[in-house]
Amino acid sequence: MAQPDTFGRYRVIRHLGSGSFATVWLAHDDRLDTPVAVKVLAENWSHQLDVHHRFMEEARILRQADSAWLVRVHDIGTLPDERPYFVMPYADQGSVADLTAKGPLPLDEALRLLTEIGQGVTVLHRHGTIHRDIKPSNVLLQSSPVGQRVLVADLGFAKAIDGASGFTAAAGTPGYMSPEQRGPGGDLDVRADVYSLGAVAYELITGRRPPPPPVRVPPRRLRPGVPRALDDVIMSALAEDRAARPSDAKAFTDRIRAIRMTPDLRSQLPWWVRYRRAWQRAVAAGVAAAALVAGTTGAAASTVGALTEVRYAGDDLHLAVPAAWAQQFHNGRAVPSAVESDRASGVLVATDLDSWDDPEAAVAGVFAALLPGTGRDLDAMLTGSPCAGQAERRAFTGADWSGEIREWSDCPGQPTTVAVALLAARDHGTTLYLEVRRPAHSPNVIDRIIAATRLER
Ligand SMILES: Nc1ncnc2c1ncn2[C@@H]1O[C@H](COP(=O)(O)OP(=O)(O)OP(=O)(O)O)[C@@H](O)[C@H]1O
C-alpha cells in the first residue's frame, strides 16, 4: 500500500509495520498535537467478511476494556474504499520482542515486564476475552513519565470466552501457542493464555523461545540462579494438561508478583547476574568517558598474541589484555561483594560487552577492579557459579601479585572458560579482583595477564 497523506484528521508520517491482516502507520493528530498509530485493514482482506468482523471486534474489545495495560482505541473510521481503521496511542519503544532478541533479560526487569503483561491479560480475562496470541511482538512498549509502560496489543485472534468452544480455525503462534490451540475445533478457555504467558516468561528468562510442548527443560537449566519458585510457576504454566496450570492470568501474575517481592531475591542471584544491570546501564557513558591508553607489551608469542596495556584516566591500574580482546571497553561495572554497600567499580575490556554476563556466549575479555585492603575472602564475594561443575582452584604467586584463581571450564554451549582471581598486591594494601573469559585454546593466558598487570606507584 502506497503511503497515504491522511486517515481522516490524522496526518500520516510513516509506515510502522504490517501484520497478516492489517498495516499500521505512524500518524500525527494535529488537533491534539500527539503522535498516534493507525491500524488499517489490509486491502486484500477487506472483502472477507469474517476478517472484517474480527478487525472491528478487536477495536471494540480494546475500546470496551479501556485499560492502561492494553492498547487503547481512541477513534475509529472508514477510508473512502470502505476499509476500516482504528487509532491507538503510538508505542514509541518498540515491543518486548526487541528486548528478547538481545538475549535473556536481567531478572528484575523480566519480572517487572511479566507482572505488567499479566495485568493486561488479567483485564482481558475479566472482560470475558481470550487473547489467543500472546507473544513478545504483541506486547508493545511506550515511554511514560515514570519509565516504560507495557501495552498488550493485537487482539486479531481474540475471542469471547462464551463462544470459545468449537473454533473453526487453529490460531496462535508456534512456540507460544498452547497444545489445545494446535487443532481446529479446540475447546479453549483462559488457560490457553496462561500457557502463552508461561512461554513469554520462559523466553524473557532464558533468551529462548520454549520448544513445542511438552516442555521438559526448565529455565533453571539454561540460566543458573533462577529462583526455584519462578521455575515452578513457568513450568506449571507450560503444562500440557491445562488443569495443572494456574487457573487464569491473575493466578499466574499473583505468583510472579510474590516472587518479585521476595526480599532476598537479589541475594539469591549468582554474582554475574546480580551485577549485570549496573554495568549495562552505564555502558554508553562509560565508553564515552573512558580513555583507553594502549601500548603493546613485548610478550612472548602465544596463541592469543601479544598483550595490550589498557589504562583508564584517573585509575592507577595498568591492565594487560590480549590485543584481540580489546575491542570494547567500559568502566563502572560493580564488583561482587558480600556487602552491598561495599561496592567498588572496575574496568571491563571484552570482544563484546553485551554478552559478558551470558555464560554461553563466545566472548573473551577481562574485568578488573582494585579493592582497598587485603585479606578478602573470595567465597564471601561469590554466590553461585557461572557454569556447571566445580571450579578448579589454584594458587598464583608472581612478582607483583599473589592469591587464588578459580576456573570453570564446563560452560554450556560455547568453548569458553570463566575464571575469577583475587590477588593481593605485594607491598601495597590493595587487592586485585579479576574475571577472565577466555577461549579454550589459550590455557596460559590468565597467568600472563596477571603477571603483566601492574599498579602505578
Ligand atoms: N500502537 C502501536 N504503536 C507502535 N507500533 C505498533 C502499534 N500497533 C502495532 N504496531 C506495530 O505495527 C506492526 C504490525 O502490527 P499488527 O498488530 O498488525 O501485526 P503483527 O502483530 O506484526 O502481526 P500478526 O497480526 O500477523 O501477528 C508491528 O510491527 C507492531 O509492532
Image (cartoon, grey):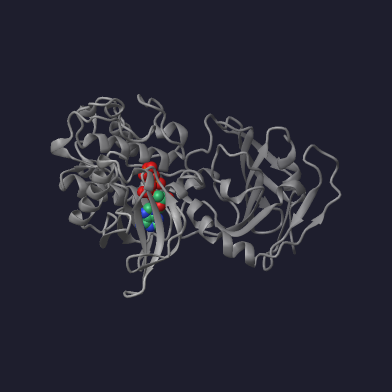
Q: Give the residue drawn at x 82%, y 53%.
A: 296
At which x and y percent is residue 79?
Answer: 32, 58
Number of residue marks: 0
Quarter-wise, where is residue 428 in the image? Answer: bottom right
Q: Give the residue drawn at x 85%, y 40%.
A: 301
At which x and y percent is residue 103?
Answer: 50, 44
Quarter-wise, where is residue 364 in the image? Answer: top right
Q: Is residue 245 above or below residue 338?
A: above
Instruction: Using the image as rendered, state which of residue 313 and residue 412 is in the foreground.
Output: 412
At which x and y percent is residue 259?
Answer: 30, 45
Instruction: Using the image as rendered, state which of residue 391 and residue 70 is in the foreground.
Output: 70
Instruction: Using the image as rendered, state which of residue 417 and residue 283 is in the foreground.
Output: 283
At which x and y percent is residue 383?
Answer: 47, 42
Quarter-wise, where is residue 295 in the image? Answer: bottom right
Q: Is residue 244 visible?
A: yes
- Please identify the quadrant where the C terminus is shown: bottom right
- Judge left or right: residue 112 versus residue 13: left
- Judge left or right: residue 390 versus residue 268: right
Q: Is residue 371 visible?
A: no
- Judge left or right: residue 409 versus residue 300: left
Residue at the outermost front position:
81
Q: Is residue 38 above or below residue 213?
A: below
Residue at the outermost left position:
162
